[in-house]
Image: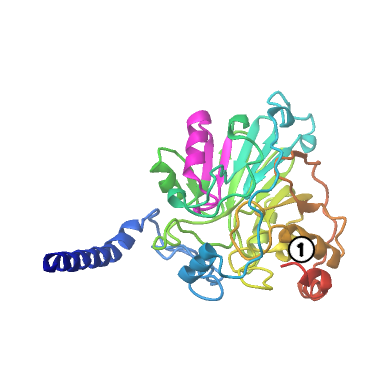
Amino acid sequence: MGRIIKGLVWTVVWLVAALCLAITIVPRFLDRIYYRGVAGDHFDGARFFNPDGDDTTAPPGGSRRGYLWRQATGTDGRPDWPDHVPVTPAKPAELLPATTRPAREPARTPMRVTWVGHASVLVQTPGLNILTDPVWSDRAGPFGFGPKRVAAPGIALADLPKIDLILISHNHYDHLDLSTLKTLYDRDRPAIVTSLGNDAILRSAGMAATALDWRQAERVGGATVHVVRNHHWSSRWFVDRNRALWSAFVVELPGGNLFFAGDTGMGDGKWVREAAALGPIRLALIPIGAFRFQPGQMASGAHIGPVDALDVFGRLGASQGLAIHWGTFRLSYEGWATPPKLLTEAKRCAGQGDRRFGAATIGRPVDIAPTTAPAAAPFDRAAVLRCLDGPAGNALR
């Protein structure tokens, strides 16, 4: 018996020692230097930051570890989500045919867009198939862990047309999915454009990418891709926070520009003007979900909610907008259908019921009309919030 007890004691000692060693070594091992460069207005020589000084890395109401624990255990009082929602995936015959030719007048160039889910969107114009933040994996996280998708992809991976250009906004697992990217890269060898540092992650998996700083551009086929500022943060692990840059994109196309917001909070909002200054936006892809990390919240530091998304759409001067980044992975506090319902209420409160900005439907292709002059859209955020502070708005958790 004495030998058994002594053996157990030594086993515990070794386990404690191994744990202490892991706590010391593993975080440093998981840290990565994705980018080296000169310090500037959003890079301090080691990590990137939002130039308006707003820290988006810690969720409201406690530490990130505490938030992740409450999310994983379901102890934060979140509204229930469905385990599965019906999706009718688009078939190849519903997508823009490869034989489609540009219109004689550039402004009339066809554009068809299909929401795959979350921030993954297929945008098609003649001769160019663009895919944003492609994620086909069942879970958004490392090693098979992370939030499980409740909505199947809106296009089967095998049914995707040849992809010419992939835009990657940042390195969070629900936006940078190495498994999906590697499949598409091996099949199509698309051009991949992202922001600084993310190319190192792709290169480690055998993929080449062009990594640009904010306000830099790259020519791809008949398009010019601008990497533009937004307001977010980055990390693949706890300790590599902000080692790589986050961004939005403006893609100059013959029929009018495409804007893809990526993941973004509002911050100082100046990034909206920078994107709009690059020319008329035909289509804006704007997130509306994962905005409520505590009850009653309308937007977090890292994500805009429906109210701010409506403001962004108006200030972009976009002809048409699709609301994305909701209803696929459960990332935050709000109910599954709350983002589109709250967007509808916000539009009513703002008197913008006829504006062409609404929630997308996964798997349903939409033809985007030619660029038009935007209607004036004054937006009083305080007035909209007061309007939403009523029975209809407060009923939406």
- In the picture of the structure, the residue carrying the numbered disc 1 is 342
Quadrant where the N terminus is found in the figure? bottom left
Which quadrant would the C terminus be assigned to in this image?
bottom right
Relative to 43, say whether 94 is above or below.
Answer: above
- Going by the numbered disc 1, the residue's amino acid type is Leu
| Residue 238: in magenta span | no
| Residue at figure coordinates x 67%, y 60% from the top left | 272
Q: Is residue 254 left or right of 344 when viewed as pictured?
A: left
Q: Residue furthest top?
A: 99
Q: Residue at x 70, y 35 (%)?
A: 90
- Position in image of residue 246 (x %, y %): 53, 56
Residue 22 position within the rendered picture, expressed as x and y whole percent measured from the top left: 28, 62
Q: Is residue 175 magenta?
A: yes
Q: Which residues are magenta?
A: 164-193
Does residue 237 appear to the left or right of 231 in the view shown? Answer: left
Within 10 Å of the Cα at label 1, are there few (<14), some (14-19), or many (20+) other Cα atoms?
many
- Taking depth in this image into account, of 127 and 106 the one nearest to the observer is 127
Q: Residue at coordinates 65% horizontally, 37% vertically from top-left?
A: 155
* Camera sees residue 197: no
Instruction: State the image coordinates of residue 20 (x, y, percent, origin top left).
Output: 26, 67
Q: Secondary structure at mark 1?
A: helix
